[in-house]
């Protein structure tokens, strides 16, 4: 097994000691064992882009700005204590007395190095701040960020950008890959937990940063073991049996059962924009036919999805949930099953006996179920859907390379107030999750202009237009919008659902109740 060391250069040989994999570890008051649904491919905050990568980056690194989980439009100070905007220029005043885990002081140079590197690499969450023109260090505690055009959302979007050390960037710049390999398997942040070790195939270990500038609850967890448990049934069994203190992506039936059983409570809240969403390939027949896609949208059995989630789900009326700031959802027309209208749309398409393949990322039973609902619904109008499961990367590559007509994906937005970045990633040309290659010039123009508009009412009107363009294209079936349900043992307190992130955990808020 390969072991990676943390910023301090130390690691605990937990496997050799024979204690890291025992259920008893989850019962130690200062140790928290988390069952994650996968192993990171990287822990580089410039590249991290899935839940189990954010498990590390969100907890090891800090951001300039935070926000109120109960009111995402309300921004809170983090590494920046104050910020102002003048046209295209934002000025951030930085917190004093903050150090990285290796002891180096946090300064404006770190902010500049982070953003410059993120934009150069152009991966991960870089799309959230790709409107940055340049970053200027005024002094150790002041940084100016100029954007390409005026935007009201920069501070909100910076709430997701983890700050790395300028010294680390400089130290590894001479490497052939510009230090990307080092950041991919090491971490040195200012956050509430420091990186200790990564045992490939097993776990990542974190240690509480006692010098963190923020505030921990009483009885925080000193040691975090982030276990890689790819099988959902094993995550459920381990959580229920006490091997794990918390688990990500517990299968829905198990989550509802465990969360209402003795010794557990259920945390429920808004997080997902769609779970799942079914994307159609706009370039390949038969899904490149708008009327054909319309027939699939109208034939889909939405009630089957609501029943699957045991009534804890809504049928989306478009891409933006009603609880997001400025959403047009409440006044949008319902999207519902209508077989007669579906047959009429199919007739208008001119396609008879249509057949296509839908690719599903493996390991997500909700995705598989939605694909089978699509398959059964389409069969009622004479369309055949072949369902194929593949690992996530292979699945999304299949539709991007025109080897599949359909891809099933979950939707969540990483900005607490800016829907345009979600649109950029999912519906604009070149967006990573725009797997079906949707393109509409009017939408491109709206998304570019909206962040420049000062008036919130006017922005809401533009967001409504943007949503209608996507809905009217029949590019996507929003199969369901369930609440997020997380079973929490009664011995654990503090878990909250972040409405503007992929389903994840904020270790610094958790505490033992024993």
Image (cartoon, rainbow, N blue to C red):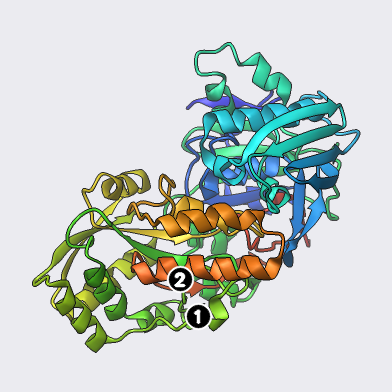
Determine the image quadrant of residue 197: top right
**Residue where numbered disc 1 is placed:** 332
- State the residue in front, 278 or 305: 278
Disc 2 on helix, strand or loop?
A: helix
- Distance CA(mark 2)–CA(mark 1): 9 Å
- Count of numbered circles in the view: 2
Which residue does the image show at 42% across and 65% down from the upper left? 470
Which residue does the image show at 44% across and 73% down from the upper left? 480
Q: Residues within 10 Å of mark 1 (few under 14, many from 20)?
A: some
Tell me where residue 301 appears, x and y as whole percent: 32, 80
Disc 1 on helix, strand or loop?
A: loop
For the residues bearing labels 2 and 1, Cβ distance under 8 angstroms: yes
**Residue 221 shows in the view:** no
The image quadrant where one finds the C terminus is: bottom right
**Residue where numbered disc 2 is placed:** 468
Tell me where residue 229 appears, x and y as whole percent: 48, 49
């Amino acid at each position: 097994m390969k072991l990676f060391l943390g910023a301090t250069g130390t690691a605990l040989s937990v496997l050799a000691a024979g204690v890291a994999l025992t259920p008893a570890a989850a019962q130690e008051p200062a140790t928290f064992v988390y069952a994650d649904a996968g192993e990171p491919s990287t822990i580089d905050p410039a590249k991290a882009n899935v839940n189990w990568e954010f498990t590390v980056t969100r907890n090891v690194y800090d951001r300039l700005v935070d926000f109120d989980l109960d009111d995402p439009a309300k921004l809170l100070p983090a590494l920046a204590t104050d910020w102002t905007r003048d046209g295209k220029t934002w000025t951030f005043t930085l917190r004093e007395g903050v150090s990285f885990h290796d002891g180096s002081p946090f300064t404006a140079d770190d902010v500049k190095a982070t953003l410059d590197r993120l934009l150069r690499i152009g991966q991960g969450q870089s799309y959230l701040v790709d409107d940055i023109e340049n970053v200027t260090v005024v002094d150790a505690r002041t940084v100016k960020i100029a954007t390409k055009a005026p935007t009201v959302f920069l501070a909100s979007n910076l709430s997701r950008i983890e700050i790395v050390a300028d010294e680390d960037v400089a130290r590894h710049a001479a490497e052939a890959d510009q230090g990307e390999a080092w950041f991919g398997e090491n971490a040195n942040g200012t956050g509430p937990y420091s990186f200790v070790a990564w045992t490939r195939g097993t776990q990542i270990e974190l240690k509480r940063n006692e010098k963190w500038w923020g505030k921990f609850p009483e009885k925080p967890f000193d040691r975090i073991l982030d276990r890689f448990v790819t099988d959902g049934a094993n995550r459920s069994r381990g959580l229920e049996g006490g091997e794990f203190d918390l688990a990500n992506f517990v299968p829905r039936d198990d989550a509802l059962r465990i969360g209402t059983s003795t010794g557990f409570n259920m945390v429920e809240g808004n997080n997902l924009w769609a779970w799942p969403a079914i994307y159609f390939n706009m370039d390949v027949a038969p899904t490149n036919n708008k009327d054909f896609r319309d027939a699939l949208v109208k034939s889909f059995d939405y009630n089957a999805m609501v029943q699957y989630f045991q009534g804890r789900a809504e049928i989306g009326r478009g891409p933006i949930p009603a609880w997001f700031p400025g959403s047009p959802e409440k006044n949008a027309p319902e999207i519902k099953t209508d077989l007669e209208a579906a047959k009429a749309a199919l007739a208008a398409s001119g396609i008879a006996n249509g057949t296509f393949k839908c690719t599903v990322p493996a390991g997500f039973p909700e995705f598989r179920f939605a694909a089978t609902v699509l398959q059964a619904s389409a069969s009622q109008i004479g369309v055949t859907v072949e369902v194929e499961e593949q690992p996530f990367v292979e699945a999304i590559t299949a539709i991007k390379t025109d080897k599949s007509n359909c891809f099933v994906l979950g939707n969540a937005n990483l900005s607490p107030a800016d829907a345009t970045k979600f649109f950029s990633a999912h519906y604009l040309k070149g967006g990573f999750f725009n797997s079906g290659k949707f393109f509409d010039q009017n939408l491109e123009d709206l998304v570019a202009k909206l962040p420049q508009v000062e008036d919130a009412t006017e922005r809401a009107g533009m967001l409504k237009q943007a949503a209608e363009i996507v809905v009217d294209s029949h590019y996507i079936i929003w199969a369901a919008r369930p609440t997020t349900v997380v079973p929490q043992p009664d011995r654990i307190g503090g878990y909250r659902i972040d409405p503007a992130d992929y389903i994840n955990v904020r270790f610094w808020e958790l505490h033992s109740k024993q």
